[in-house]
Image (cartoon, rainbow, N blue to C red):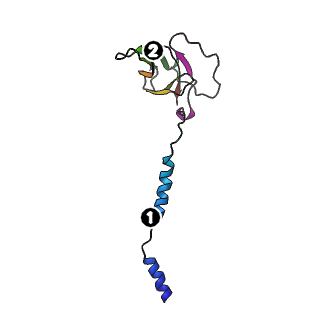
């Protein structure tokens, strides 16, 4: 009879779950204390069109053709012309003439929405422009204090 009462008394004591909570909380918070490394932007789930190069001023063309079969086909109009056009320009800021805005004008000549990623050549410094059908948008790619000339590459995201 004594052993039954001891077991009953042991069960009636309040249990201490604070140790379990501390461990669970540590498992949730601990990974967030360390900064995660900055990774380059993933291009639209890995699906994009062939990069197309351009720039302001006299820019040499890319002598190397991209790998065949690794890119999605770019959107085209019914007559086979590309839907996306990108034109680069640079202008001095109105407030501070020592700073130059490097601008891209991105246009969509097709009736469906297209996302375009525009980057500086050989850089991960990019912007993503979401265009609706028949829309043209002007965006600042970056700023500079010295040169009005820059090179860019763009690709369609799928």
Where does the image place residue 101, in percent across and percent down from the top left? 42, 18
Give the residue at x 43% y 76%. Answer: 13
Badge 1 marks a residue whose secondary structure is helix
Q: Which residues make up the magenta segment? A: 41-59
Q: Which residue is mark 1?
A: 18
* Residue at the limit of the structure toward the bottom, as seen here: 1
Mark 2 closeness class: few <14, some 14–19, many ≥20 residues within 10 Å: some
- Which of the two discs, 2 and 1, labels the residue nearer the N terminus? 1
Give the residue at x 61% y 16%. Answer: 62
Q: Is residue 69 magenta?
A: no
Quick check: 104 above or below 16?
above
* Residue at the limit of the structure toward the top, as seen here: 58
Mark 1 closeness class: few <14, some 14–19, many ≥20 residues within 10 Å: few
Where does the image place residue 123, in percent across and percent down from the top left? 55, 25
Give the residue at x 48% y 18%. Answer: 86
Q: Residue 89 got which mark?
A: 2
Residue placed most toward the observer, 8 or 16? 16
Q: Is residue 52 magenta?
A: yes
Where does the image place residue 18, in percent across and percent down from the top left? 44, 64
Badge 2 marks a residue whose secondary structure is strand
Q: Residue 94 got which mark?
A: none
- Determine whether, in the image, residue 67 is placed left or right of residue 126: right
């Amino acid at each position: 009879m004594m052993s039954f009462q001891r077991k009953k008394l042991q069960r009636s004591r309040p249990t201490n779950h604070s140790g379990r909570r501390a461990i669970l909380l540590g498992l949730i918070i601990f990974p967030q204390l360390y900064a995660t490394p900055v990774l380059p932007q993933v291009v639209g789930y890995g699906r994009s069109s062939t990069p197309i190069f351009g720039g302001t001023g006299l820019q040499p063309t890319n002598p190397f053709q991209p790998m065949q079969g690794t890119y999605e086909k770019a959107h085209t109009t019914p007559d086979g012309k590309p839907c996306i056009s990108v034109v680069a320009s640079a202008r001095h800021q109105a407030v501070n003439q020592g700073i130059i805005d490097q601008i891209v004008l991105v246009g969509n000549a097709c009736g469906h929405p297209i996302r375009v990623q525009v980057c500086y050549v050989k850089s991960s410094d990019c912007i993503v422009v979401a265009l609706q059908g028949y829309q043209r948008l002007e965006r600042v790619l970056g700023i500079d204090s010295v040169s009005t000339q820059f090179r860019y590459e763009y690709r369609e995201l799928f």
